[in-house]
Amino acid sequence: MTDQTSGTESRTPLVPPSRRAPRKRRRGLKITLSIVLVLLLAAGGTVYWLYSKLDGNIKGVDINKALGDDRPEKLPTSGQNLLVLGSDSRAGAENKELGGGGSVSGARSDTAMVVHIPEGRKRAVAVSIPRDTLVTRPECTKPDGSTLPSAKRAMFNGVYSLAGPACVVKTVEKMSGVRIDHYLEINFAGFKDLVDAIGGVTVDVPQDINDKSSGLNLTAGPHKLNGTESLAYVRTRHGIGDGSDLGRIGLQQQFLLALLSEVKSQDLLSSPTNSYKIANSATKSLTTDSGLASLKSLAEFGRSMDGVDPSTMETIMLPVAYDKQDPNRVVAAQPQAGDLWKAIRKDGTIPESAKKSPATGG
């Protein structure tokens, strides 16, 4: 079935199984801020005689040129905002295999996080935007130079496939009023290879998971997952909660903290060999804005984030409510979402009331 307003394929319902009809299984890459933070920190410790190889891995997109001057103002402080996307592209043999093959074409932004790093860079807040959120998509210029007209009630994850990363940044800025300073994107293969390079990640599985779609079978309790298992874990929805994308966001945020804790406990940054291995795995599948599209820029940014500790990081889902016209979609819940974005714009403390979402995903 096709979403008439956004032109994207209809996705899995967000309502409990008892209230919805069966839909085709949704496949998509689910990553978290952990990928970005590990990459940035690892890049900071990489020996420079390997600079050329790593630097050549990174692909850049000139977001500032694409968006022009019609953007929110920069933070009046030294705080930074990053938009982190996970692409479900099947480009290349490894991505296609990890994505399950099939006839899926193009790519979507199946994971989106606005990462706010306040002044002082001693903590961070990651705000997950559900992929099925209905938004007002602004007019955008496509990569081929043609114009994509604005549209109301467009599904958020379809913006990427219609007009590329610059339009996703523009959409986030319009819906939030938050200026996005940097953009980072990674695909299936990059996620898997990064986890394997670290040596796996230990997660405390909250309940038994038996997902026939992904083949993931885990009992409740601690498990050390390799790259392929980690990808299945952060993508699973059939085996957790009510089967919606909202429930899966909780696993992604849990994985974020587990991965950061794994890096800290292993002290990987003290080993140039391990740092190079991690950085090489990640940069091969990384796309950034032009401001970060070099090893030097990544290293400098990584060093500025040395003070960010997993224990001080906060993960929040954008407060959303089920759409009244289509309960299979969600919309930003007000006033919670407005209060959340306002706090980020002002580099201030996020009120507890702005962290509560009417639609929880079970």
Image (spheres, rainbow, N blue to C red):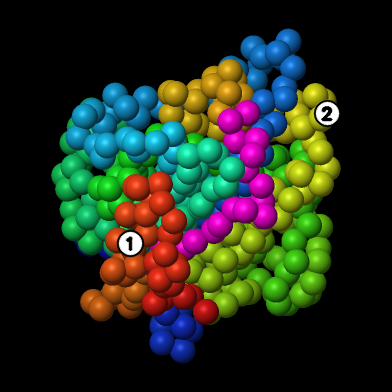
What's drawn in magenta, residue-wise? Answer: 303-319
Residue in the image at 44% along x and 48% along y: 114
Residue in the image at 70% along x and 65% along y: 215
Q: Is residue 308 left or right of residue 64?
A: right
User: Which secondary structure lies at badge 2?
Assistant: loop
Q: Nearer the viewer, mark 1 or mark 2?
A: 1
User: Residue 25, image x and y in percent?
Assistant: 51, 67
Q: Is residue 306 magenta?
A: yes
Quadrant (top left, top right, bottom left, bottom right) of the N terminus: bottom left
Residue type indicated by callout 2: Ser
Q: Of residues 22 and 147, which is closer to you in this image? A: 147
> Up-down: is 45 above or below 261?
above
Q: Which residue is mark 1?
A: 339
Q: Is residue 286 left or right of residue 179?
A: right
> Up-down: is 346 above or below 355?
above
Residue in the image at 77% along x and 38% along y: 197
User: Residue 3, image x and y in percent?
Assistant: 28, 63
Q: Is residue 350 left or right of residue 247?
A: left
> Considering only order in the chain, which callout, 2 or 1, is on the residue closer to the N terminus?
2
> Up-down: is 240 above or below 337?
below
User: Which secondary structure lies at badge 1?
Assistant: helix
Calculate the distance from the C-alpha at mark 1 to the C-alpha at mark 2. 42 Å
For residue 163, say whether it is visible: no
For residue 129, say whether it is visible: yes
Q: Which residue is mark 2?
A: 271
Q: Of residues 220 and 337, which is closer to you in this image? A: 337
Q: Is residue 265 left or right of residue 248?
A: right
User: Residue 137, image x and y in percent?
Assistant: 23, 50
User: Residue 341, image x and y in percent?
Assistant: 34, 55
Residue extending farthest bottom: 18
